[in-house]
Amino acid sequence: MKRIAIALAALAAVTAPASAQKLKGSDTLLPLVQKESENYAKARQGADITVTGGGSGVGISALMEGTADIAMASRKMKFDEKLKLQHAGKAPVEVTVAYDALAVVVNPTNRVTELTREELEGIFTGKITNWKQLGGDDLKIVVYSRETSSGTYEFFKESVLKNKNYMASILSMPATGAIIQSVSQTKGAIGYVGLAYLNKNVKAVHVSYDGGKSYVAPSFENARNKTYPIVRPLYFYYVKDREKGVRPFVDYMLSSEGQGTVRQIGYIPVK
């Protein structure tokens, strides 16, 4: 009887469904992690992973509140966020799971195809207000941005605006898909999105970070070889005491299969 009990216990351990995991945060990471979780679940019967967006800040808040097992983030965790976790006795762990190029997009009818970093700064801070100032049509520039909880918002401000404030009248969008839709429907529009979100409904402009000497298109190859200047790491954050439960999926993301999906979806692998 004892041997039977041991055998049944071992069988239960093998066949029991994996514990549910909740990932929340960056909309940039959303399409990638949804696909990765689908592939992971197919190979591991009973794996239950829920993936939702909302922005990097939302994901990190959920991690702090204990309502998410992994926060997806397109920016580094802020000092005060780390401090809150540490005060709660939770040690945050950071893992880079992919890289992403940030593309500046305009309406396909826009004649402007190239912009310098300084011109982008002028547009998004409100100093440049008409496309004719940039060699385009006499058309008001309509500026779209992600909302403040977004890591993409933070990264664009840091890399492109050099930490200058966005214009007060900027149109904040709750998700990347909303920026794509708005720019595609508005002739004078401009916005920024992750490389994987690019489609034929918008036009990605070539960007120069050397004062107009060279302009580079946002593409997988240009991001990988670092000739395109607006590239950032994408992160998973979890707390150390939950590592045993979340690490199998994190390791899968970093495996050759997981990184193959990174490339397939349109992101840049970490290795």
Image (tube, rainbow, N blue to C red):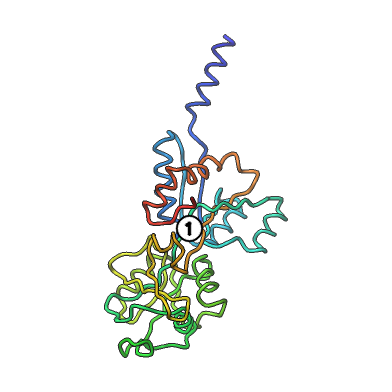
Q: Residue 19: where, in percent of width, then height?
A: 52, 38
Indicate left or right for 242 with 149 as reference: right
Q: Residue 84: where, in percent of width, then height?
A: 68, 59
Residue at 65%, 43% (x, y): give it: 241
Q: Quadrant of residue 58?
A: bottom right
Residue at 47%, 86% (x, y): give it: 126
Q: Residue 31: where, in percent of width, then height?
A: 40, 55
- The quadrant of the image that shows the N terminus is top right
Q: Quadrant of residue 171?
A: bottom left
Residue 28 in the image: above or below residue 186: above
Q: Residue 24: where, in percent of width, then height?
A: 50, 54
Name the one closer to the observer, 220 or 80.
220
Reading the image, the residue beneath label 1 is 99
Judged from the image, the secondary structure of the residue bearing numbered disc 1 is: strand
**Tally of marks:** 1
Type of residue at label 1?
Answer: Tyr
Residue 148 in the image: above or below residue 189: above
Residue 75 in the image: above or below residue 45: below
Q: Residue furthest top?
A: 1
Q: Residues within 10 Å of mark 1 (few under 14, many from 20)?
A: many
Residue 136 in the image: above or below residue 244: below
Residue at 70%, 54% (x, y): give it: 86
Name the one closer to the observer, 208 or 90.
208
Indicate left or right for 175 with 236 as reference: left
